[in-house]
C-alpha cells in the first residue's frame, strides 16, 4: 500500500501560486495511492514546460525528455516492459505543437500509455506566448497586434478521437475527486488513453482563471453513451459558455504491444549474449 509520504519528493515545487498544476499533481498522487500498484511499476515521462516538471515533484520513476518527444519515449518504455503503468505529462504546447504528430500516431497504434495533457491555453514556461489551444483573439507576446491570435484553437478531444484513441476524457484541475477517478480509469484502460485537463495559468492567461472554469465546466450526463465515437466527436465541439468534463469515449481492443511478435513476453525479459549481437553492433559503427 502506497502512502502519501511515499510519494513526497525532496525537490522544491517551482510553480506559481495559483497554478493549476498543483491540483493535477494532487490528483495524480491520489490516483497512484488508490490504484495500489508497487511504486516501481509506475513510469512517468514528460516533455518541456511547466507540466514537464511534474515527474520531479512526485517520488516515482521518471524520464524528462525533449520538447514534444515524451510520447515516443513512453512508447519504447511500454514495449520494453509491458508491466509498467506509463504516464505522459505534457502541456498544450508540448503535446499539440511540437508533439502533435507523435500523439496522433500513438493514438492510431493504440499504445498502452496514459497521456495527461495539461491545457492552460498558453506557453507558461517561456512567459506567455500563444499556444495551439489559445482562443481566437487571445492577445499575447507573440500574437499579431492588435487583434490577437488569428486562428481557432485545436480541438484536443476531437484530435484524439480522430487519431484513434480508445479512451478520451476531460477533467478540471479544480475538481480533484473527478480528476482522480479519470486518471485511475485512464491508467487501468488497456490502450491509448488521453485525459485533457483544463487548468488556469493565473499569470499569463488570466482570462482562463479559476472562476472562468468553475462557471462553465459540467459533468457529462449519466445517460451519455461513451461507446459512441460519433457522439463523442459531436460533443467535443462544445467549448465556450459550457465545457463538458468526464469520459467522452471508451472502447477496448487489442493494444500496440499485443500486436507485436513478443511470444516470450516483454523485451525486458529477453536476454542477449553480447557476443551474439556484436556483429550487428560492428555494422552500425562509423
Image: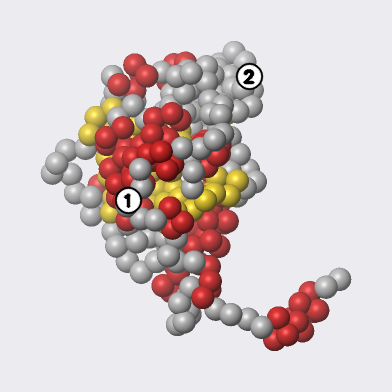
Q: How is colour applied across the structure in the image?
A: secondary structure
- Is label 1 in contact with label 2 (beta carbons under 8 Å)? no
Q: Seen from this angle, which residue lies furthest top?
A: 146
Q: Earlier in the sequence, mark 1 or mark 2?
A: 1
- Which residue is the site of mark 1? 1
At a point 33% along the width and 45% down the height, the residue shown is: 33
Residue 268 in sight: yes
Of residues 147 and 104, the one drawn nearer to the viewer in this rendering = 104
For the residue labelled by badge 2, is the local secondary structure a helix, a strand or a loop? loop
Q: Is residue 49 above or below residue 262?
A: above
Residue 183 in sight: no
- Which residue is the site of mark 2? 141
* Residue 129 image offset from top left, x and y in percent: 60, 25
Q: Is residue 260 above or below residue 189?
A: below
Residue 252 shows which numbered tag? none
At a point 49% along the width and 47% down the height, the residue shown is: 60
State left or right for residue 127 relative to residue 184: right
Q: Is residue 261 above or below residue 166?
A: below
At a point 39% along the width and 30% down the height, the residue shown is: 23
Q: Seen from this angle, which residue lies furthest right?
A: 286
At a point 46% along the width and 82% down the height, the residue shown is: 264
Q: Is residue 283 above or below residue 217?
A: below
For the residue labelled by badge 1, is the local secondary structure a helix, a strand or a loop? loop
* Badge 2: residue crowd in 10 Å (few <14, some 14–19, many ≥20): few
Of residues 213 and 23, the one drawn nearer to the viewer in this rendering = 23
* Residue 270 image offset from top left, x and y in percent: 55, 78
* Residue 128 image offset from top left, x and y in percent: 59, 22
- Nearer to us: label 1 or label 2: 1
Q: CA distance from mark 1 to mark 2?
A: 47 Å
Amino acid at each position: 500500500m502506497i502512502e502519501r509520504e511515499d510519494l513526497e519528493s525532496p525537490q522544491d515545487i517551482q510553480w506559481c501560486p495559483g497554478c493549476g498544476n498543483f491540483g493535477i499533481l494532487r490528483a495524480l498522487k491520489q490516483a497512484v495511492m488508490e490504484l495500489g500498484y508497487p511504486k516501481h511499476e509506475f513510469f512517468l515521462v514528460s516533455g518541456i514546460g511547466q507540466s514537464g516538471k511534474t515527474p520531479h515533484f512526485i517520488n516515482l520513476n521518471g524520464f524528462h525528455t525533449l520538447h514534444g518527444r515524451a510520447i515516443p519515449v513512453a512508447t519504447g518504455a511500454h514495449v520494453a516492459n509491458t508491466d509498467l503503468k506509463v504516464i505522459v505529462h505534457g502541456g498544450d504546447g508540448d503535446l499539440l505543437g511540437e508533439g502533435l504528430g507523435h500523439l496522433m500516431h500513438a493514438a492510431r497504434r493504440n499504445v498502452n500509455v496514459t497521456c495527461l495533457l495539461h491545457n492552460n491555453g498558453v506557453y507558461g514556461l517561456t512567459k506567455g506566448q500563444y499556444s495551439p489551444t489559445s482562443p481566437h483573439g487571445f492577445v499575447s507576446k507573440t500574437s499579431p497586434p492588435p487583434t490577437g491570435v488569428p486562428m481557432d484553437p485545436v480541438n484536443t478531444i476531437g484530435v484524439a478521437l480522430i487519431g484513434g484513441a480508445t479512451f478520451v476524457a476531460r477533467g478540471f484541475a479544480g475538481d480533484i475527486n473527478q480528476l482522480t477517478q479519470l486518471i485511475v480509469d485512464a491508467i487501468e484502460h488497456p490502450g491509448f488513453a488521453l485525459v485533457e485537463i483544463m487548468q488556469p495559468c493565473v499569470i499569463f492567461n488570466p482570462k482562463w482563471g479559476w472562476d472562468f472554469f468553475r462557471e462553465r465546466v459540467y459533468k457529462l450526463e449519466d445517460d451519455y453513451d461513451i461507446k459512441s465515437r460519433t457522439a463523442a466527436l459531436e460533443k467535443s465541439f462544445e467549448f465556450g459558455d459550457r465545457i463538458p468534463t468526464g469520459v467522452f469515449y471508451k472502447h477496448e481492443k487489442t493494444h500496440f504491444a499485443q500486436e507485436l511478435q513478443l511470444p516470450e513476453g516483454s523485451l525486458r525479459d529477453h536476454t542477449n549474449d553480447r557476443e551474439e549481437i556484436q556483429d550487428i553492433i560492428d555494422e552500425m559503427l562509423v
